């Protein structure tokens, strides 16, 4: 269990450090100067922050279990595509794996997210996350335990389908939590000109995800608007 506590510490630190910095900067230090630019003008209440953090702690505990069982169990690990030395695949593959991981994760997230909005499934999996109709950075991991299991399913999917170096996971999930916190930030940091550009219109934004929380449908993507655009679910 020592390894589990180590993983738990790493995942917890990542969440509390990144979400905490975003919250401190936007909701405390800079708030008097940027309040007028908030996507939803009203601030969440303290009870919202506490609920989001509470569910996030449970999510973190679930997230830490998956690498513990799949990576540190020698029998299971032998069936994965995890490799030890970058030289085994080379630097070209190493860097190309990251955009591929983004595409795979965005596809996984979009379709599981839409399924969790299905009547009959929604209240068991996704309603907890949507209690944050005006989300804060703390909402990044505020999932019901059943949804947390769905969300962490991307980890074994990567392990068993793509050749992965351990640093792929560290860097990718660091990027993922940063983008997740940005999506729930409550402020838009992309300039309007970028969002309206031919490239930017495919990138998911805090504004788009905030609308999803406010109106409960559409904008199901994580990093990209690709699936929302081609499936007609973009608000």
Image: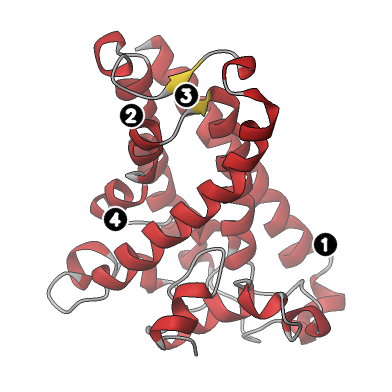
Q: Quadrant of residue 217?
A: bottom left
Task: State how many labels appear.
Answer: 4
Q: Marks 4/1: CA distance?
A: 33 Å
The first of marks 3 and 2 along the sequence is: 3
Q: Secondary structure at mark 1?
A: helix
Along the line of sight, the residue nearer the viewer: 110 or 50: 110
- x and y percentages locating residue 188 in the rendered image: 72, 76
Q: Secondary structure at mark 4?
A: helix
Q: Which residue is mark 4?
A: 147
The first of marks 3 and 1 along the sequence is: 3
Instruction: Tell me what residue is drawn at x 59 percent, y 13 percent.
Output: 85
Q: Residues within 10 Å of mark 2 (few under 14, many from 20)?
A: some
Instruction: Tell me what residue is drawn at x 38 percent, y 52 percent.
Output: 55
The first of marks 2 and 4 along the sequence is: 2
Along the line of sight, the residue nearer the viewer: 154 or 217: 154
Instruction: Tell me what residue is drawn at x 47 percent, y 24 percent.
Output: 7
Q: Which residue is mark 2?
A: 65
Q: Residues within 10 Å of mark 3 (few under 14, many from 20)?
A: many
The first of marks 4 and 3 along the sequence is: 3
Please give the label number shown on residue 71: none
Q: Marks 3/2: CA distance?
A: 8 Å
Q: Secondary structure at mark 3?
A: helix
Please give the label number shown on residue 29: 1
């Amino acid at each position: 269990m020592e390894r589990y506590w180590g993983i738990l510490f790493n995942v917890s630190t990542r969440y509390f450090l990144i979400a905490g910095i975003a919250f401190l900067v936007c909701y405390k230090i800079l708030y008097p100067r940027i309040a007028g630019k908030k996507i939803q003008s009203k601030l969440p209440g303290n009870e919202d922050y506490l609920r989001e953090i509470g569910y996030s702690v449970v999510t973190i505990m679930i997230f830490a279990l998956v690498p513990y069982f799949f990576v540190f169990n020698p029998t299971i690990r032998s069936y994965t595509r995890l490799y030890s030395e970058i030289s085994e695949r080379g630097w070209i593959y190493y860097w190309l794996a990251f955009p591929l991981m983004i595409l795979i994760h965005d596809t996984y997230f979009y379709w599981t997210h839409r399924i969790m909005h299905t009547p009959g499934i929604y209240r068991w999996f996704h309603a907890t996350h949507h209690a944050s109709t005006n989300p804060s950075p703390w909402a990044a991991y505020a999932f019901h335990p059943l949804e947390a299991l769905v969300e962490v399913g991307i980890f074994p999917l990567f392990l068993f389908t793509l050749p992965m170096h351990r640093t792929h996971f560290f860097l990718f999930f660091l990027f993922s939590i940063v983008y997740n916190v940005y999506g729930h930030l409550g402020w838009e940091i992309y300039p309007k000109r970028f969002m309206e550009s031919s490239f930017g219109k495919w990138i998911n934004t805090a504004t788009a995800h905030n609308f999803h929380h406010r109106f409960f449908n559409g904008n199901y993507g994580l990093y990209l608007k690709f699936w929302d655009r081609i499936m007609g679910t973009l608000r």
